[in-house]
Image (cartoon, grey):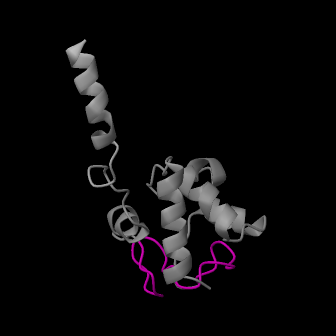
Amino acid sequence: MRFLASAALCLPLLASPALAQTAPSGEQLFRSQCGACHALDTRNRVGPGLAGVFGRKAASVESFRYSNAMRAKAAEGLTWDEATLHAYLTAPRQVVPGTTMSYAGQKDEGRLDALVGYLKENAGS
């Protein structure tokens, strides 16, 4: 019984914000998951530059060589907005089958929201 009472007293401490692990920021997620291949400006890397990505038609950066799959989706009308980026960053190969982007996707909704929010603020339209 003493153990249970002691454990009950410790539970609030385990849930305290000071001890809780903080979620990575959108910037941290971009740097760790996207930044090696994408720049927030117009520079192309392995992937296209993301400046002005919101509202931009897919596969529309003229100086970047897109996969056939991405060009086909663009021809179907794929345009990047919060909803399409959210879906694509969750499961790229489901949104664009045959994409050459090697990113497996972000399944955690909180992290995904932080990442898309960061892109909206920093790559914007």
Image quadrant where one finds the C terminus: bottom right
Q: Is residue 77 magenta?
A: no
Residue 66 coordinates in the image, percent (x, y):
56, 70
Question: Residue 24 lies in what quarter of the image?
Answer: bottom left
In the figure, is residue 38 to the left or right of 51? left
Residue at horizontal 64%, vertical 78%? 54
Of residues 65 and 107, the one drawn nearer to the viewer in this rendering: 107
Of residues 26 and 40, the one drawn nearer to the viewer in this rendering: 26
Residue at horizontal 65%, vertical 67%? 82
* Residue 65 can be seen, yes or no: no
In the figure, is residue 31 to the left or right of 40? left
Q: Is residue 49 magenta?
A: yes
Residue found at the very far top of the displayed protein: 1
Residue found at the very far right of the displayed protein: 76
Q: Is residue 100 above or below residue 60?
A: above
Residue 40 coordinates in the image, percent (x, y):
45, 81
Q: Which residues are magenta?
A: 38-61
Q: Main secondary structure of the magenta part?
A: loop
Image quadrant where one finds the N terminus: top left
Residue at horizontal 62%, vertical 73%? 59
Q: Is residue 69 above or below residue 43?
A: above
Q: Is residue 72 above or below residue 49?
A: above
In the figure, is residue 33 to the left or right of 50? left
Residue 26 coordinates in the image, percent (x, y):
43, 67
* Residue 5 can be seen, yes or no: yes
Question: Residue 44 lies in what quarter of the image?
Answer: bottom left
